Image: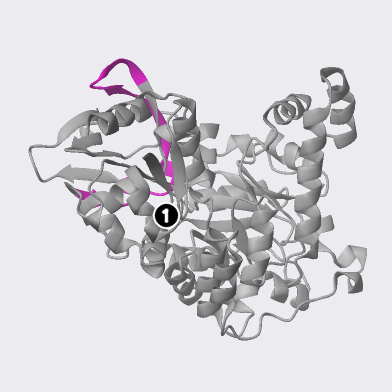
Amino acid sequence: MEKKSFDVKVGLAEMLKGGVIMDVTNAEQAKIAEDAGAVAVMALERIPADIRADGGIARMSNPTMIKEIQDIVSIPVMAKCRIGHFAEAQVLESLEIDFIDESEVLTPADEENHIWKHDFQVPFVCGCRNLGEALRRIGEGAAMIRTKGEAGSGNIVEAVRHMRQVQKDIKKLTVLADDELMAEAKNLGAPFELVRKVAKDGKLPVPNFAAGGVATPADASLMMQLGAETVFVGSGIFKSNDPAARAKAIVTATTYFDNAKKVAEVSEGLKDAMEGIDINELSENEKLANRGW
Amino acid sequence: MKIGILGLQGAFFKHQQMLNSLDCENFIVRYPEEINQCKALILPGGESTTITKLIDRIGMRQQLINFNGPIFGTCAGAILLSETCDDERVKVFGKIPVNGFRNAYGRQIESFKKEIKLSFSDKKFPAIFIRAPKFSLINSEIEVLSEFENIPVLLKYKNILISAFHPELTKDLRIHKYFIELVEKS
């Protein structure tokens, strides 16, 4: 029986498509997320907006909290570990977490290396800003890719930038000749075999999700129309004034992302979305997306 | 008349790729009124709680209950077709007399890939089980088309086909072909 098989890891990511993955910080929020129709929850101690506001070192969540969330919901439970912190990943695997996010939202533990994810039985998701970064993470064993966006900002602009960049990079590969691919692999800083595969297939070899700054049903629709296959919502739900209603609305808007009437209908009556941050007000070292490479 | 693939959430595009490879006319179903345009249905894998909630939120339950054509359900889709489910968060349609048990092998870490025998083919099938359910039979008329460790994993009852694993995640078209033949016969 093969349990470490890449097909099995990507398989779970396939099952999450067309859904919404929600950040939760306790069992009560996890229940709200599941009731709203989330396909998975991301268990973390503080949502990105609070991590940003509080400062200090952000680490893997406490196992007690993760277990409480695992006990209350039946959908997959994800958790974050610090970039390069393979011991945190080992702990999360021992807790039987369903998916690990090696995330720039936490303070990186290794500024040079990411985790060698092929060693694990549990699948990983990693953030990216462009195709080179996506393929480096897939080369290390990531079974799902998401945009980095700018977590905790309530501002979709960075997720849009990253999703468009990935799509643009992919389109470019599909029109290059065979003898141009090595040079492009060098430009992208990406594994050559994966570059060839993307050039041939015209898409990433693993599911491509959106994250970082999603706050409204229309944000979810925008990311899906730009080519995301599922949407992560971090601070957008539990930093808003109506988490349950907003969570439900974002789920429906993700299913009917191409139907503006439906998106309008579910947006009606929602209270204020989370307060956002203008990305231009963040200095380069305040941007979480700059963590990892 | 085409085969409709329920596209509310989950691996519906993977099923579409399989049907396209078999030159079988199909479309993604997301609205209640589209159910009547289908000759047969596929209920894909995904999260059964999420799919349950969406079905009720958009008012598609009655159309699905009334649908009499052949249906193929994989994983979460199979659970939805069961007579009962051990998890009250999932509302079933009772189209096939089995009891469904969600995530019966455990969490993702217990997911696996295994070659299994099919009753209608000589060659083994590369079955991928993702947080897979188990089924127990409550009617002797059910045909067991495949078993793994003495547990039925591919079942047929009248015009309903269910699998605990995900044939749509492979390149092996045999099970989808089997379903299309079932549709053609009906």
The answer to whether residue A111 is seen in the rendering is yes
Quadrant of residue A73 within the rendered picture: bottom left
Whether residue B36 is situated above or below residue A271 in the rendered picture: above
How far across and how far down the image is residue B47, in percent? 42, 54
The answer to whether residue A58 is magenta is: no
How far across and how far down the image is residue B89, in percent? 32, 65
Q: How did the renderer colour the structure? A: one colour
Whether residue A173 is situated above or below residue A258 in the rendered picture: above
Amino acid at circle 1: Glu
How far across and how far down the image is residue B61, in percent? 31, 62
Which residue is pictured at 44% across the width and 67% down the height?
A34
Secondary structure beneath label 1: loop
Count of marks, rendered view? 1
Question: What's the magenta region?
Answer: B99-124
Is residue B20 rendered to the left or right of residue A272?
left
Is residue A57 rendered to the left or right of residue B153?
right
Residue receiving disc 1: B47
Which residue is pictured at 79% across the width and 53% down the height?
A162
Quadrant of residue A274 within the rendered picture: bottom right
Q: Nearer the viewer, residue A53 or B51?
A: B51
Whether residue A229 is situated above or below residue A263 in the rendered picture: above
* Mark 1 Cα-neighbour bin, 10 Å: few <14, some 14–19, many ≥20: many
Q: Nearer the viewer, residue B150 or A240?
A: A240
Chain for numbered disc 1: B
Whether residue B14 is situated above or below residue A21 in the rendered picture: above
The answer to whether residue B108 is magenta is: yes
Which residue is pictured at 61% across the width and 35% down the height?
A118
The N terminus of chain A sits in image quarter: top left
Which residue is pictured at 10% across the width and 46% down the height?
B138
The answer to whether residue B148 is seen in the rendering is no
How far across and how far down the image is residue A150, in percent? 77, 64
